[in-house]
C-alpha cells in the first residue's frame, strides 16, 4: 500500500516523540451567553489516542465545546479534564494543546518555518533543536520544500497543512481541529482529511475534530458525538451511529435516509405494507421511519414510479414516488437501469429502522 | 490609447492641470519664503540673512529656537510612546475582549477633533495645576495634552490596520501555541498592525511639531512658540527657521516611514477565501 510505504519512509523527531496519548473528559459542561444556554451539561469521555468528532448542524454547540476545551471560552458549569486534571483554571497557553482553526490562522508576517517554530519559541526550545523539529513537522505534512514561503504565497490546503505542522511540532497532549477543512475545495478536503487521520494514527495523539460534515466525521473518527441544540444525542462508532441511530436527529443527520410514514405495532414498524424491526421503544400508533437507500432494492411488493435516476459512477441512486405519494430513495448497481416514469416494484430489507414520532 | 482609460479618469490635460495647481498651491508660499530670506535691503540678492544665523554674536537671540526644538522633539517622543504603549494595546483589548465598547470608545477617541484647541486649554489649565504638583512642570508633561489632541488621528490609523487583520484568530492561534498575552501583543499583533502603528506615529509627530495654541496658552515653550518669539525681533530668522522646520519635519517623517517599512512585508491578505 502506498500509505504504509509513505509511513515507513517518514521518520523524524515528531514521530520519535510519539506518546501514549492523553485522556480528555467533559463532565456536565454548561456554557451560557447571557440568557442563552448553548451547552446543556455535556458529558464526553475521550480515551487516550482516540480520534473523536463533534458532529452537528451549525449552532449546535460543537465549536463552543471545543473552545471550552481549549480554554478560549470559560465554562459556566461542569469540569473539563485533560490527563485527568481539572483544567478549568488553566489558561489556554498553559494547556499544552495544538489547534487548527477554520479561518486561516498562519501569522502573515512570518514564513512557513517561523510559523511552525512559533510554539517551540514560546517554550524556549534551543534553536538547533527547534530547527530539526520544524523540518520534521513540515516533512510530516509534505511541505518541507516550502519552508521559506510566506502564508500569502500558499494555497488554502497548504496553509492548513502548515497550521497542522505548527500545531503538532510542540508534541501537544491534545490536538483540536475546528472545522479545518471547511474553507477548502472538495478534492483537497478529502485528501487532507485522510492525511490528518494518517498522521493522527501515527502519532497516537488524542484528537477532537469539530465538523458539520457527517461524511467527513464518518470517514476519520474512532467515535463520533452527534450534537443537537447544546446536547450530545449519541456517542458511538461510525457504524453504530449509521446502523443504530439513537434518535431521529441522529438518523436524519448521519447518512442519507428517506422519511416514510409508518405504523408502530408491537415494536415493529409497518412501512408500505412491509414489517420492519424498529430501533428503540415507541408507543403503538402512527410514526415516521428512516429508510436507508441501500436497504431498498428492485423487485418486491411496493409499487412506485421512477421520478429521477442519478448515475454516481460506482452506483445509481433513484428517487421513487410510491402509490401513497411518499418519496423513497433507492441505491442500486449501475447495471440495473430504470427509466423515468417507469413503474417498478421494490422491497425494503428487513433491517432495523430509526423511528420518529409524529405530531 | 484613451480606450484603456477608465471612464471616470480625467484626461491627460486635466491631470496635468490638477498637478500644476496642486504643486503651485504648496510651492508658492514656500518659494516666496525662500526668496524673502534671500532679499537684500536694497532689492538685491544676498545670503547675509542665512549667514547671520550662524554668527556667534546672535547666538543669544536664537537660543529659544534650539530650546523649543529640543522640547518639541521630547514631546513628539513622549506622545508617540503614549500612542504605542497606551492607545494601541487598549484598542486591541477593546477589539478582542470588549467588542461592545467599540462604538463608545470610537466616539470618545474622535471627540477631540471637534473641540478647538483654544477651548481645550480652558479645561486643561486647571488640570495642569494638578499635573504640575504631581509630575512637576517638566516640558514632557505637555505630552498628556498632546496625547489627547492626536487621539482622533492615531485612532483612525490604527483602527484601519485592526480591521484589515483577523486579530481574533491570530491571537487565539498564538495563545493555543503557548504565547502569553504580552507575547501575543508583541510577537504577533504588533508586527501585523505595523502599517497602522507607523502611520499613527507619523501623524502624532507631525501634529506635535506643528502645535502652537496649547503650548502658548499654557505658557510652555516649543518649536512653534519659539518661532513666534524670535520672529517678532527678527523676521528674516523666523522665516528661515520656519523653512528649516518644514524641511526637518519632512525629513523626520521620511525617516520614520522608512524605518516602519524596513522589513519586506508580505502583501496584506485582502481575502480569506481558499485558493486551491
Image (cartoon, coloured by chain):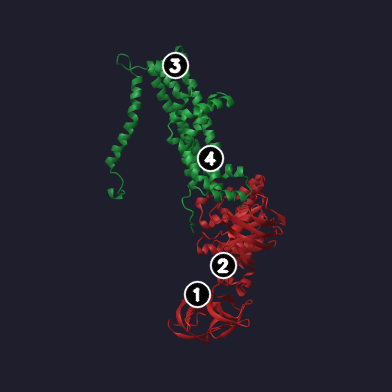
Chain colours: A red, B green
Mark nearer the N terminus (4 vs 3): 3
Q: Is residue B29 visible?
A: yes
Query: Horizontal and vertical percent for residue A173?
Result: 68, 55
Give the chain of mark 2. Answer: A
**Which corner quadrant of the image does residue A124 belong to?**
top right
Left or right: where A230 falls relative to B51? right
Whether label 3 touches label 1, CB < 8 Å: no
* Viewer-nearest of discs 4 and 1: 4
Callout 4: chain: B
User: As displayed, is residue A284 above or below residue B92?
Assistant: below
In the visual, does A128 lie left or right of A317?
right
Q: Secondary structure at mark 1?
A: loop
Residue, disc 2: A214
Would you name the residue on which mark 3 appears? Answer: B54
Instruction: State whether discs 2 and 3 lie on one chain.
Output: no
- Circles 4 and 3 on the same subunit: yes
Q: CA distance from mark 4 to mark 1?
A: 57 Å
Q: Is residue A7 above or below residue B135?
A: below
What residue is pinned by disc 1? A313
Q: Which residue is mark 4?
A: B88
Query: Tag 2 or tag 1, which sits nearer the N-term?
Result: 2
Spatial CA distance of label 1 from label 2 is: 21 Å
Dot 3: element: helix
Q: Residue A305 appears at what percent x and percent y?
A: 46, 83
| Camera-nearest label, 1 or 2 | 2
Q: Residue at x 63, y 83 (%)?
A: A266
Q: Residues within 10 Å of mark 1 (few under 14, many from 20)?
A: few
Amino acid at each position: 500500500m502506498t500509505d504504509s510505504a509513505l509511513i515507513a519512509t517518514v521518520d523524524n523527531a515528531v514521530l520519535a516523540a510519539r506518546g501514549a496519548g492523553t485522556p480528555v473528559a467533559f463532565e456536565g459542561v454548561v456554557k451560557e451567553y447571557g440568557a442563552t444556554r448553548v451547552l446543556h451539561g455535556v458529558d464526553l469521555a475521550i480515551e487516550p489516542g482516540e480520534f473523536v468528532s463533534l458532529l452537528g448542524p451549525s449552532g449546535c454547540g460543537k465549536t463552543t465545546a471545543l473552545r471550552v476545551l481549549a480554554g478560549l471560552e470559560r465554562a459556566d458549569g461542569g469540569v473539563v479534564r485533560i490527563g485527568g486534571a481539572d483544567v478549568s483554571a488553566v489558561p489556554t497557553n498553559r494547556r499544552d494543546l495544538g489547534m487548527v482553526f477554520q479561518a486561516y490562522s498562519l501569522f502573515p508576517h512570518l514564513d512557513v518555518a517561523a510559523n511552525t517554530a512559533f510554539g517551540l519559541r514560546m517554550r524556549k526550545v534551543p534553536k538547533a533543536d527547534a530547527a530539526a523539529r520544524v523540518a520534521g513537522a513540515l516533512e510530516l505534512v509534505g511541505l518541507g520544500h516550502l519552508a521559506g514561503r510566506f502564508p500569502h504565497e500558499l494555497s488554502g490546503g497548504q496553509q492548513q497543512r502548515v497550521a497542522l505542522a505548527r500545531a503538532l511540532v510542540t508534541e501537544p497532549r491534545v490536538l483540536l481541529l475546528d472545522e479545518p477543512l471547511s474553507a477548502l475545495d472538495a478534492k483537497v478536503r478529502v485528501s487532507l482529511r485522510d492525511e490528518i487521520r494518517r498522521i493522527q494514527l501515527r502519532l497516537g495523539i488524542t484528537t477532537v475534530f469539530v465538523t458539520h460534515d457527517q461524511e467527513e466525521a464518518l470517514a476519520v473518527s474512532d467515535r463520533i458525538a452527534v450534537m443537537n441544540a447544546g446536547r450530545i444525542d449519541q456517542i458511538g462508532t461510525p457504524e453504530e451511529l449509521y446502523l443504530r441511530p439513537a434518535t431521529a436527529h441522529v438518523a436524519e443527520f448521519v447518512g442519507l435516509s428517506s422519511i416514510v410514514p409508518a405504523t408502530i405495532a408491537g415494536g415493529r414498524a409497518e412501512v408500505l405494507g412491509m414489517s420492519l424491526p424498529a430501533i428503540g421503544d415507541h408507543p403503538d400508533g402512527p410514526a415516521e421511519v428512516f429508510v436507508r437507500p441501500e436497504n431498498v432494492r428492485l423487485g418486491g411488493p411496493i409499487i412506485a414510479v421512477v421520478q429521477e435516476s442519478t448515475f454516481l459512477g460506482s452506483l445509481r441512486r433513484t428517487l421513487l414516488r410510491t402509490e401513497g405519494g411518499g418519496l423513497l430513495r433507492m441505491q442500486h448497481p449501475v447495471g440495473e437501469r430504470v427509466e423515468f416514469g417507469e413503474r417498478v416494484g421494490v422491497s425494503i430489507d428487513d433491517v432495523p429502522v430509526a423511528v420518529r414520532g409524529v405530531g | 490609447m484613451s480606450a484603456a482609460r477608465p471612464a471616470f479618469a480625467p484626461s491627460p490635460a486635466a491631470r496635468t492641470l490638477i498637478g500644476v495647481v496642486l504643486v503651485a498651491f504648496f510651492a508658492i508660499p514656500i518659494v516666496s519664503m525662500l526668496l524673502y530670506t534671500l532679499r537684500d535691503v536694497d532689492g538685491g540678492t544676498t545670503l547675509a540673512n542665512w549667514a547671520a544665523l550662524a554668527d556667534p554674536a546672535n547666538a543669544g537671540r536664537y537660543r529659544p529656537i534650539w530650546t523649543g526644538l529640543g522640547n518639541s522633539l521630547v514631546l513628539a517622543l513622549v506622545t508617540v510612546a503614549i500612542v504605542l504603549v497606551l492607545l494601541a494595546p487598549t484598542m486591541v483589548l477593546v477589539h478582542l475582549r470588549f467588542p461592545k465598547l467599540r462604538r463608545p470608545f470610537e466616539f470618545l477617541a474622535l471627540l477631540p477633533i471637534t473641540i478647538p484647541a483654544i477651548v481645550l486649554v480652558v479645561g486643561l489649565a486647571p488640570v495642569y495645576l494638578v499635573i504640575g504638583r504631581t509630575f512637576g512642570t517638566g516640558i514632557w508633561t505637555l505630552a498628556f495634552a498632546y496625547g489627547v489632541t492626536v487621539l482622533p488621528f492615531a485612532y483612525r490609523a490604527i483602527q484601519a490596520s485592526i480591521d484589515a487583520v483577523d486579530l481574533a484568530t491570530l491571537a487565539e492561534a498564538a495563545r493555543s501555541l503557548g504565547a502569553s498575552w504580552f507575547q501575543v501583543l508583541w510577537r504577533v499583533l504588533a508586527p501585523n498592525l505595523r502599517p497602522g502603528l507607523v502611520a499613527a506615529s507619523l501623524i502624532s509627530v507631525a501634529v506635535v511639531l506643528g502645535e502652537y495654541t496649547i503650548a502658548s496658552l499654557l505658557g510652555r515653550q516649543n518649536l512653534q512658540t519659539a518661532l513666534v518669539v524670535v520672529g517678532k525681533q527678527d523676521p528674516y530668522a523666523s522665516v528661515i527657521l520656519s523653512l528649516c522646520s518644514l524641511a526637518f519635519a519632512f525629513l523626520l517623517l521620511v525617516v520614520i516611514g522608512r524605518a516602519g517599512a524596513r522589513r519586506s512585508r508580505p502583501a496584506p491578505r485582502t481575502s480569506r477565501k481558499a485558493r486551491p
